[in-house]
Amino acid sequence: MERIITSQKYAAYILFIALMVTLSLSLTQGAISLNLWQVLGVLTGSIDDAFARLVVLDIRLPRVLLGAIVGAGLAIAGAAMQGLFRNPLADPGLVGVSSGAALAAILVIVLGGTYLKQWMSFWGYFALPLAAFMGGVLVTWVIYKVATYQGRTDVATMLLAGVAINAITGAISGVLTYYASDEALRSLTFWSMGSLASASWVDVAMAGTPIVVACCCLPFFSRALNAFLMGETVSHHMGFNVKRMKQIVIALTALAVGSAVAVSGVIGFVGLVAPHLVRLLTGPDHRWVLPLSAMMGALLVVLSDIVARLLIAPAELPIGLVMASVGGPFFLGLLLKQRTKSGF
Amino acid sequence: MLCANQLHLSIGQKIILDDVSLTLKPGEMLAVLGPNGAGKSTLLKALSGDIAELAHSISLNGKRLKHWAPASLAQYRAVMPQFVQLTFAFSVEEVIETSLRHPMSNALRNTHIQQMLSLFDAEHLRHRNYLSLSGGEQQRVQLARVISQLETLPVQEPQYLLLDECTSSLDLTHQHQVFQVLKKMAKQKNRSVLVILHDLNLAAQYADRILLMKAGRAVALGGVKEVLDANQLSEVYEYPIDVIEHPGGWPLVIPAHYPLVA
């Protein structure tokens, strides 16, 4: 696809400004409208309005931050996976990492009162996110093992294994819904469509730490991923330690996706759309695509969350629905436009 | 030197390489010829270290391949495969840049990329989308990338270039330009070049030595005139072939017009 902006630096500046604007917009908008000065006043401590403080510090700020963190994590994981699979349509959802994490969480929601009682009482508040994270890591490990034969990871097999895993987890989740109580069913539906509604500072810390780690480490593999796009043997000939690079990138990706799904449920499309939009701006060089995808992902999720909150206020939509209903058609349009051009 | 000692490889019942031994001397250009399925590409893969079970019978500059760390090996040998699959829209410049492992100032990098591209008449492609190039243009860019990999750091010991049909999509002029550049580089920089070829006359004109392969075996390894013998070629290719002398002094290979067996 041809690039819109020739200078990658400008793309970075524009994206950064857009992200800042969206973040401040998100802090001011909602069931209670605040202006930017009130928000800034609360943040700097110069306003002593208890109500404004409650809205900004306890409700909106954790939610906005969580949205940004989750978006950044999903998008950078998507960008890294697309590099790893040499396929611009790869996505954490596609290879089953998200659905593995989701299945583990559904297990906890549905069976928490019966079979998994011990797990629940031992981990308490962390039971569900921890299970989701472990589900993501487990699926990544299974797929990697299935696709690795004699020390080589076959990308096509990995994608197909992902399709199979998605089918399996989908079937098990389906069966589980029949055992779910009414209350569990509602939380399950809401959760499987993705939501930031219950965001708390604990969530921010819990998802934030691993995702920040992933966002800081993945860019170190930019050059290796660039070479990898020309094929596994080519990048090996160019002197990259391909095997180690694959292992680390896969682990970091699972970490980011597992943590994101753990706190916000399944928010699809970010991992697919964000890197795609960034490549449109900067081209496929991972030195730009990885960091800018994180920014783009944060922007998209926070923006969708604003829509999710405002569209039917004071009630709100699951953010996954917003993302899918806007992202889906948009992406189809991109594909149609792309047919005439070469490459991603 | 790049030495391979009695390489043997079979998959199931099929023998892919049958006791092939080879020494690539510094500064020489060796052409590997033979019909389809002779094991030429497998030999190149083995020499570049891709076949783990053969890596212990191959040594580069006196050190066995399996003992080389990938990063330092890459400074001494570069490989150009038959096909490079790239589906992302890198610019030509970015493709060359992937070969630069060490930090460089912007100005230095610019001139380096310019130099590499100009070797193969590709400076004008610098800002083009790699995927929009023709097959021949892509091949020239890949050649520039491979050479660039060997040029990034000064090294003391000989370097090796392994090229699998690197001119298959080029027009006549570019084919000869490429071989002149490779030949000059081999002599001036003491680099060894191994090329797999289907064009026997290119090999006749530019190679120092030729390895002729069939069914996994090295049928002949030696000087150009010695290997390009009409009877030997006819037998290996199972097609009648004449060899005459070109006025320039090298053998000229001509597939005969008449079928020997009616």
Image: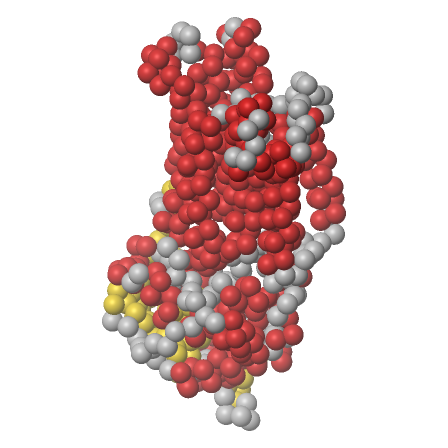
Which colour style is shown?
secondary structure
In this picture, is A78 found above or below B100?
above
The image quadrant where one finds the N terminus of chain B is bottom left
Where residue A267 appears, as percent x and y from the top left, is 57, 30
In this picture, is B161 found above or below B224?
above
Q: Quadrant of the rendered structure where residue B40 is?
A: bottom left
Where residue B12 appears, as percent x and y from the top left, is 36, 47
Q: Nearer the viewer, residue A22 or B129?
A: A22
Residue at image x 39%, y 79%? B191
Report the number of numbered marks: 0
Q: Nearer the viewer, residue B73 or A34?
A: A34
Instruction: Report if residue A100 is visible in the image.
Output: no
Where residue A144 appears, as percent x and y from the top left, is 41, 38
Left or right: residue B262 versus residue A131 is right
Left or right: residue B222 versus residue B250 is left
Left or right: residue B222 versus residue A6 is left
Residue at image x 55%, y 6%? A182
Residue at image x 71%, y 49%? A338
Instruction: Report if residue B192 is visible in the image.
Output: yes
Q: Quadrant of the rendered structure where residue B3 is?
A: bottom left
The image quadrant where one finds the C terminus of chain B is bottom right
Residue at image x 41%, y 42%? A213
Where residue A53 appears, as percent x and y from the top left, is 55, 27
Q: Quadrant of the rendered structure where residue A210 is?
A: top left
In this picture, is B248 found above or below A94?
below
In this picture, is A344 found above or below A258?
below
Q: Nearer the viewer, residue B214 or A342?
A: A342
